[in-house]
Image (cartoon, coloured by chain):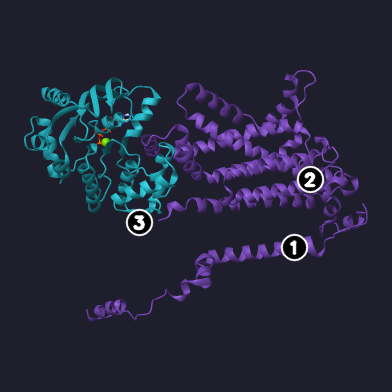
Chain colours: A cyan, B purple
Amino acid sequence: MSETLEHIASAARTDAPPAILLDKVNKWFGALHVLRDVSLSVAVGERLVVCGPSGSGKSTMIRCINRLETHQEGRIVVDGIELTDDVRALDAIRREVGMVFQSFNLFPHLTVLENCTLAPIWVRRMPKAEAESLAMHYLERVKIPEQAKKYPGQLSGGQQQRVAIARALCMKPKIMLFDEPTSALDPEMIKEVLDTMVGLAEDGMTMICVTHEMGFARTVADRVVFMDRGEIVEMGTPVQVFENPQTDRLRLFLSQILRGH
Amino acid sequence: MSDLTLTTAAATSPEAAPRTPPASQIGLRGWLRANLFSSWINTAVTLVLAYLIIRWTIGFIEWGVINAIWSVPENQTQACRDLRGVGACWAVITEKHRFILFGTYPYEEHWRPALVCLLFVGLYVVSAMRRFWRWELALVWVATLAVIGVLMWGGVLGLSYVPQERWGGLPITLILATFGLAFAFPLAILVALGRRSKLPAIKALCVLYVELIRGVPLISLLFMASVMFPLFLPEGMNIDKLLRAQIAIILFAGAYLAEVVRGGLQALPKGQYEAADALGLGYWQKTGFIILPQALRLVIPPLVNTFIGFFKDTSLVLIIGIFDLLTAGKTAIIEPAWQGFGIEVYLTVGAIYFVFCFAMSKYSQDLEAELNRHRRR
Ligand SMILES: Nc1ncnc2c1ncn2[C@@H]1O[C@H](COP(=O)(O)OP(=O)(O)OP(=O)(O)O)[C@@H](O)[C@H]1O
Ligand SMILES: [Mg+2]
């Protein structure tokens, strides 16, 4: 636990304010305590990978950051705006934070292009032509511009997830959240999605990524967070966390992950 | 072994002709075999039914065409009565069709309700075409409905005034159904959304509305609208009887449609709501662009089912003395000379209802296929 505090302290030492700050966040689902005193600070441009066993609260934590879930105690500050019941603050944050889901959640009744332009046009009030050229730009970045006129149902899983990434990028977010973006994909499609994410990381996007892809974590992450039973148990560089686990819980988790692969 | 090599070679060689299934399994012959004559029981049922269908068709043609009487001198129905049921007396339709279609509307002004019916049909056709689905369509509706009002009431532009008590027949049915569904559908969407609202007051209100209205028969609502409602109004104030029935129908249809729409809302995966939220779309943007377009597509079949049901339920207004198509038909044969020719009249009225309902049903199937194109790979 002392390590946690140390990391918050180290983040605080840098002069720029953090992109995301969680301060003793607690959340319950009914009587179930799913986040316990979670404290975390993510610097601008930092890439964070979150891992942990199923049910440990990883999804809940990142969903609290764009308020798909509400926390009950503690403070969450995103891009300098504190998350409260104020709707204007919420709108502002959702504009700055993009999210990619495990199950893609593309809008099946809209074409790929329409999926990408809907929010820029209606939330950012961008002219249609501009939104479309922006969308094509990002579809080229995720390497599927030729699919723009198709419906999501006509694409493979990997292509759909890349569209979902492009859709989030079209809002020009400062922060991207990924909740197990590759775990619904067949092995041969995982790479194309991870490559896209590596490209994003190289551009300096602030990212929090829940994933069990160790290779990705090693090459991309500045820090790895290990969660278990609603707590942040360990946090450090990929080398520290993966090569030199301090707790039995992490050792057990790593051995299971490695066996699984 | 050599045999196997041979067949594979034949299958992969480019000049091999494409093989078709055996002739006994495709085409008309294959279909007949598979569906009608696959076993001896199946064959027996097919033969019996074919016999009955042919007998019945021949009987109907004899009654309805060969032995039928198409017209009689004014009110001289003896010729029809002499048929003793072996032929139809279509003379009742020839004689009474204008009364059935337009009720007690002044005879020389019948072109007005006739035009109104055509306007309604035109409105349906235009609204059915997807390329006209723009906001301007709402203006077309308002304008058409205004013209319809002017035509029916008159009193302006040199048209003589016709009080609402004298309207009747098909225009009444179309007015009740069109206004009823045009207002009930948006109401239903709001109520369905309200029932899922996070605000307890709105939610409670919507639940109360749906449960109250669904809990009583339409007939009692119509009675309340026609008998009880005026008692609550201040002296001298009088709301048109047709309008009251119309409101009762809107409220009733609204409650049923709301439940259909809610079914669609519930069938949408949670991820769709979350993705829209995460993109920063506001409530109405999310609802209008993401949720409703998908939810309504899902419920087209039950929605049209309810629409068709209500189109026919408008005939219940007869109990409060409004002359819709069915009531006009019934009244046409009250006259002693024409008593006993109900079958012909009901067949005709039924056919009119059928045309409208079948068109709705057919259109909904096309719409469903068209709008759900995105689900095909
Ligand atoms: N909407 C909800 N209502 C009640 N309990 C919930 C809800 N969502 C999650 N939970 C519970 O909260 C706990 C944390 O869930 P969460 O989805 O954050 O875990 P996770 O670490 O993302 O797991 P996984 O790796 O399986 O995705 C779990 O015990 C889960 O059952
Ligand atoms: Mg999860």
Q: CA distance from mark 2 to mark 1?
A: 36 Å
**Given the image, what chain letter belongs to the residue carrying mark 3?**
A
Q: Position of residue A153 (x, y in %)?
A: 38, 51
Asked if residue B90 can be seen in this view, the reply is: yes
Query: Of A61 and B47, which appears nearest the observer?
Result: A61
The residue under the point 27% across, 37% down is A176
Mark 2 or mark 1, which is nearer to you? 2
Percent x, y of residue B46: 58, 65
* Chain for numbered disc 2: B
Q: CA distance from mark 3 to mark 2?
A: 55 Å
Q: Are marks 3 and 1 on the same chain?
A: no
Name the residue that disc number 3 marks. A146
Are there few (<14), some (14-19), or many (20+) residues within 10 Å of tag 3? few
Q: Name the residue that disc number 2 marks.
A: B113
How dense is the environment of label 2, judged by Cα within 10 Å: few (below 14), some, or many (20 and up)?
many
Disc 1: which residue:
B59
Disc 2 within 8 angstroms of ligand 1 (CB): no
